[in-house]
Image (cartoon, coloured by chain):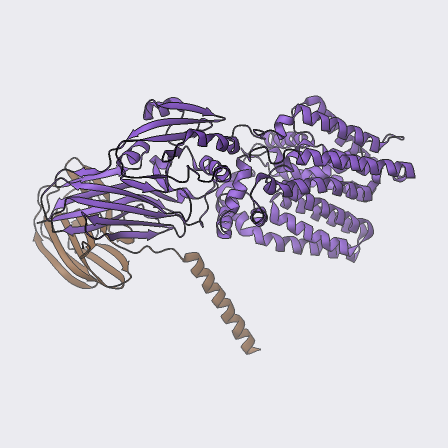
């Protein structure tokens, strides 16, 4: 059967070339059209936000919070030298996506001829998941591109024993291992395939290939090992073996169907699955030994997932993206049973039909400003366009969480010359000050579970503006700076609550509110000057006094600095204490014997955020938190 | 061959040492000042023989347990410090010896019990802190169930109720 497929009259060769051109053009349009229009969604924007930090931060992130190795972050860090626009950041994925369609053609052509190849390429070109992968700042498109290169070189080796190709394949496999942990499954499949070939042929060459593959895979993976072990230890323990076998298997198999066709149009989903099944059946019956290896590469990683009962709450279809080239390779053979099938014509029809369908029926999923694969995250880009109109210079802004805050700032920094959300400051002028609280998608952090609870706590706002998935609550905070210590023994304190801090602080700069763990104020950016000043009036005329002044805080970030400076009346300022993170203490104090009378104690807390310790939401503000400032005094005998 | 083996041994040992240091390295926080009635463990301080804070409407205290209680901290340069402490004694005949960096600075002998949470001992002492490790310890002659009993119900070897303990450098105030 496959001999007929390999027989290509000149006219048919021309037809397949034309079909390939058409497929590539449609693939390019689907991947490039309005590439910079949609807002980056949470998973995407975390990449450039993390990559804008030093490499030490990226390594720390991948060891402690992120589920991927650092490879793609380093790639994006390099790209960011050239530009940080959405187009610049997504261009690599788009280019890899288009090139992958061509590579799929080349790989399948070497197995089964150009007609089958162009149909396989068409399946990849119009695959909704591959289009998504090609339009986001995630590692999947690059991964698939390298994987296809690897497949091409591996199959050349299997067919011709070409060692140069095998060495290139080893490099591709190493690249995959550095890019995404799914490569472990794939490496398992490659390993099984090579061992099967060794078993079938029993030559020294195949044995050498197995050994070389094992050694280079281990070498490449050893670079990822600290990150991989860190993740397994901290969050991924439960992802394996912790679920019911049937539930986990059905979930994974359902996702495999989604890989074939991601959207919930069941006739189309069924058609694509049927194409894969037909192609698979043909490969089983009509394919030669090498071609059947495509099926092995598909089955081994899937079996590993099922055997380990892999599942978890954020298990998404794109995590199985690595199946895409294999599905395309299998589906490309779906017309093998039809003697006079013109796969090239079918490829053109498939590409044109699906191209039009995706543009019209699913344009909202790919090409609009609010397109997003998961709709429940705040899209920062449209928000950043609208927020500045609601703020006046000098207004203070707080957000419900730092992921949302950082995403908004990412785009605000591109859209406005002076970002009002980062330029947070307040002087000691009397009167009231507008406070804008931005809630992302109904979230209020630890402040409140919902809007009702938030409004109960904060009282009725001056105004509420709905901005896309967010709401902007505006309050007028009455300023009442300073504290009074009435008598001895006595004390006074300020908690970093939303209203209390803005009301009681004398002056501050570069700080913003964090609702977590009962509330705190954190530096808005690493390296940016941040301070808060308070004063305590001495209501007692007694002296001498033993005065304790201090802060409750968290300083979990390497190189973060928290310092307290004090000054009695107009005397010289002195450093009460300072600390460099990481610091396991949560309270620091200075104790002084004040023998002369004084009327006012001035306190200045300085915070400097270092960009070294990672925190998941695209920054690390939460690693340095000022929670309370307190003073107490007693009479000295 | 012997020299090569020795070189490899030294290289291996050096790498192992670096690895151990890297694993155990922790950012030791310098000690500035501390109030044991404000935080369980003040920043930069090690505490032994002093239990957590207990509160009642009459006040706050921390039990000092065992034959001695100690505070340890590191200083990056020599500095004079003030130690203020107050204790409530529940055990008749108690003897307390304060030892700072190996030198006895105060002895409280023949102590009688005073009403609950009223200071039996109240002391302010200046001492010279030294560069590196510093150690303040109180040694007790009696503890509950060891030489005397003041409460049957509590089986801990309670020695004193700490009511105040502040350590701070002088002169901090300009």
Q: Position of residue A353 (x, y in %)?
A: 75, 26
Q: Can residue A82 be seen in this view?
A: yes
Can residue A283 be seen in the rendering of this structure? no
Q: The brown chain is which one?
A: B
Number of marks drawn? 0
Judge by depth and name the residue closer to the eye, A242 or A506.
A506
For residue A346, what is the image quadrant?
A: top right
Residue A342 position by quadrant:
top right
State left or right for residue A386 relative to residue A212.
left
Q: Nearer the viewer, residue A622 or A51?
A: A51
Above or below for A586 versus A378: below
Q: Where is residue A505, by image quadrant?
A: top left
**Quadrant of the rendering where the N terminus of chain A is positioned:** top right
Residue B97 at x, y = what percent?
14, 58
Look at 60% across and 44% down and name the residue there: A181
| Horizontal relation, residue B107 to residue A57: left or right | left
In this picture, is B94 found above or below B129? above
Q: Residue A397: give x, y in percent of width and height.
A: 38, 34
- Compare residues A507 and B70 and report the one nearer the observer: A507
Compared to A588, does A479 lie above or below? above
> Seen from this angle, which residue lies furthest right?
A9
Relative placement, left or right, of B106 versus A162 is left
> According to the rendering, which colour does chain A have?
purple
């Amino acid at each position: 059967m496959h001999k007929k497929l390999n027989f290509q009259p000149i006219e048919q060769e021309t037809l397949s070339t034309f079909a390939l051109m058409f497929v590539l053009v449609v693939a390019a349009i689907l991947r490039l059209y309005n590439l910079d229009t949609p807002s980056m969604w949470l998973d995407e924007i975390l990449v450039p936000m993390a990559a804008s930090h030093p490499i030490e931060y990226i390594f720390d992130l991948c060891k402690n919070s992120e589920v991927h190795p650092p490879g793609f972050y380093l790639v994006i860090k390099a790209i960011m030298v050239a530009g940080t626009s959405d187009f610049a950041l997504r261009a690599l994925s788009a280019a890899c996506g288009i090139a992958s369609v061509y590579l799929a053609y080349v790989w399948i052509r070497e197995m089964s001829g150009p007609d089958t190849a162009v149909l396989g390429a068409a399946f990849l070109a119009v695959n909704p998941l591959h289009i998504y992968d090609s339009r986001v700042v995630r590692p999947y498109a690059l991964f698939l591109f390298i994987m296809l290169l690897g497949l091409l070189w591996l199959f050349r080796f299997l067919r011709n024993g070409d060692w140069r190709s095998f060495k290139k394949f080893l490099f591709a496999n190493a690249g995959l291992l550095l890019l995404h942990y799914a490569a472990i499954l794939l490496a398992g499949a490659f390993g099984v395939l090579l061992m099967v070939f060794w078993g079938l042929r029993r030559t020294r060459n195949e044995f050498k290939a197995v050994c070389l593959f094992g050694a280079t895979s281990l070498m490449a993976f050893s670079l990822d090992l600290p990150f991989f072990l860190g993740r397994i230890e901290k969050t991924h323990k439960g992802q394996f073996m912790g679920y019911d076998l049937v539930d986990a298997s059905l979930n994974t198999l359902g996702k495999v169907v989604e890989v074939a066709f991601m959207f919930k149009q069941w006739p189309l989903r069924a058609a694509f699955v049927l194409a894969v099944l037909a192609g698979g059946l043909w490969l089983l019956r009509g394919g030669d030994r090498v071609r059947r290896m495509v099926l092995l590469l598909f089955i081994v990683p899937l079996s590993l997932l099922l055997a380990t009962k892999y599942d978890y709450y954020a298990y998404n279809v794109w995590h199985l993206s690595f199946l895409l080239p294999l599905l395309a390779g299998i589906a490309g053979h779906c017309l093998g049973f039809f003697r006079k099938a013109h796969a090239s014509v079918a490829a053109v029809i498939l590409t044109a039909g699906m191209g039009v369908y995706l543009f019209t029926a699913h344009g909202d999923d790919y090409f609009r400003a609010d397109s997003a694969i998961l709709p429940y995250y705040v899209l920062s880009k449209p928000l950043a366009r609208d927020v500045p109109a609601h703020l006046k210079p000098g207004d203070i802004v707080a957000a419900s969480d730092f992921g949302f805050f950082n995403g908004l700032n990412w785009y605000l920094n591109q859209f406005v010359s002076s970002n009002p959300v980062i330029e947070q400051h307040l002087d000691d002028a009397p009167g009231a000050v507008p406070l804008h609280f931005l809630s992302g998608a109904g979230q209020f952090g630890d402040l409140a579970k919902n809007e009702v609870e938030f409004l109960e706590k904060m009282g009725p706002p001056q105004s509420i503006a709905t901005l896309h998935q967010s709401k902007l609550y505006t309050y007028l905070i009455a300023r009442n700076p300073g504290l009074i210590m009435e008598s001895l023994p006595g004390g006074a304190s300020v908690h970093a609550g939303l209203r209390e801090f803005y009301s009681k602080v004398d002056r501050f700069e570069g700080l913003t509110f964090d609702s977590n763990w009962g509330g705190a104020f954190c530096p808005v950016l690493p390296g940016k000057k941040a301070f808060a000043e308070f004063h305590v009036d001495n209501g007692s005329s007694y002296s001498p006094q033993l005065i304790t002044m201090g802060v409750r805080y968290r300083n979990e970030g390497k190189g973060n600095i928290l310092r307290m400076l004090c000054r009695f009346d107009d005397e010289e300022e002195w450093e009460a204490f300072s600390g460099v993170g990481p610091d396991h203490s949560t309270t620091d104090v200075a104790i002084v014997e004040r023998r002369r009378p004084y009327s006012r104690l001035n306190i200045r807390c300085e915070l400097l955020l270092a960009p070294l310790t990672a925190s998941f939401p695209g920054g690390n503000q939460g690693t340095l938190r000022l929670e309370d400032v307190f003073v107490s005094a007693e009479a000295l005998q | 061959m012997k020299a090569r083996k020795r070189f490899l041994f030294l290289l291996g040992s050096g790498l192992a040492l670096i690895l151990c240091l890297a694993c155990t390295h922790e950012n030791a926080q310098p000690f500035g000042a501390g109030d044991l009635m404000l935080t369980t463990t003040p920043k930069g301080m090690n505490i032994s023989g002093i239990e957590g804070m207990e509160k009642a409407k009459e006040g706050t205290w921390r039990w000092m347990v065992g034959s001695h209680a100690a505070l340890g901290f590191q200083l990056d340069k020599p500095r004079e410090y003030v130690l203020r402490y107050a204790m409530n004694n529940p055990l008749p005949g108690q003897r307390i010896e304060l030892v700072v960096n190996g030198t006895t600075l105060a002895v409280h002998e023949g102590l009688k019990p005073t009403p609950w949470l009223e200071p039996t001992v109240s002391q302010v002492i200046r001492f010279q802190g030294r560069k590196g490790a510093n150690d303040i310890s109180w040694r007790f002659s009696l503890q509950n169930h060891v030489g005397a009993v003041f409460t049957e119900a509590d089986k801990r070897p309670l020695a004193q109720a700490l009511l105040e303990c502040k350590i701070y450098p002088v002169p901090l105030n300009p």
